[in-house]
Amino acid sequence: MNSTDNTSRSYPQTPLLGASACVFDRGKVLLVLGSNPPKQGLWSLPGGLVEVGETLHQAAARELYEETSLGADILGLADWVEVIKRDGDTIKYHFVIAMFVGRLSHGRIKAGDDAAQARWFDLSELAQLHMTTGTADLIARAFKDWIEGTS
């Protein structure tokens, strides 16, 4: 795609809407290692762009399945994030991402789609990972607000 195409992820004409899933199971959180820019080589929550006609909730569930082969019971919208990266005076990336929190419901973990790996991590391991900006803090808040005390 060229840089003037509105559907291009890099150098977009408008912000792009995404959805992600922060999924927990037995005190661990699910992360994927990105295989494509802008998340290439970084651990992050499974997620991606919302498709036309798809709700945010549906997009989060679809992306979770496409990237990990897992399903989750979505508990609710935990937060939203704006990712804006500049290339000089030009916007290289601009995403608005709705982050849902959930609990594992079914499936066997298997990396797919644009995930190089998919793994469960103890929350204590997050500080050692090369992650997308702010992800560790989002996970900690989601765990505290949605999971802790209800396990």
Image (cartoon, helix red, strand yellow):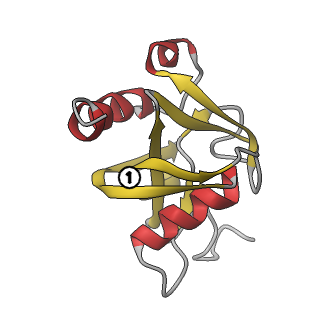
Where is residue 13 shown, x and y percent of the image? Answer: 50, 71
Q: Is residue 29 left or right of residue 120?
A: left
Where is residue 15 shown, x and y percent of the image? Answer: 43, 65
- Disc 1 target residue: 99
- The image quarter in which residue 96 lies: bottom left
Residue for point 76% across, 46% down = 110
- Around disc 1, counting alpha carbons within 10 Å, would you say few (fewer than 14), some (14 to 19), or many (20 or more)? many
**Is residue 50 or residue 142 the one in the foreground?**
142
Count of residue discs: 1
Where is residue 122 shown, x and y percent of the image? Answer: 50, 20
**Is residue 86 or residue 17 the one in the foreground?**
17
Q: Secondary structure at mark 1?
A: strand
Where is residue 60 shown, x and y percent of the image? Answer: 49, 62
Asked if one can make out residue 10 in the rendered structure from this viewpoint, the answer is: no
Location of residue 75 with respect to 49 vertically, above or below: above
Location of residue 54 with respect to 98 vertically, above or below: below
* Quadrant that contains the N terminus: bottom right
Residue for point 63% across, 74% down = 4
* Quadrant that contains the C terminus: top left
Residue for point 55% across, 28% down = 131
Asked if one can make out residue 129 in the rendered structure from this viewpoint, the answer is: yes
**Is residue 74 or residue 134 the one in the foreground?**
74
Location of residue 139 with respect to 71 vertically, above or below: above
Type of amino acid under label 1: Met
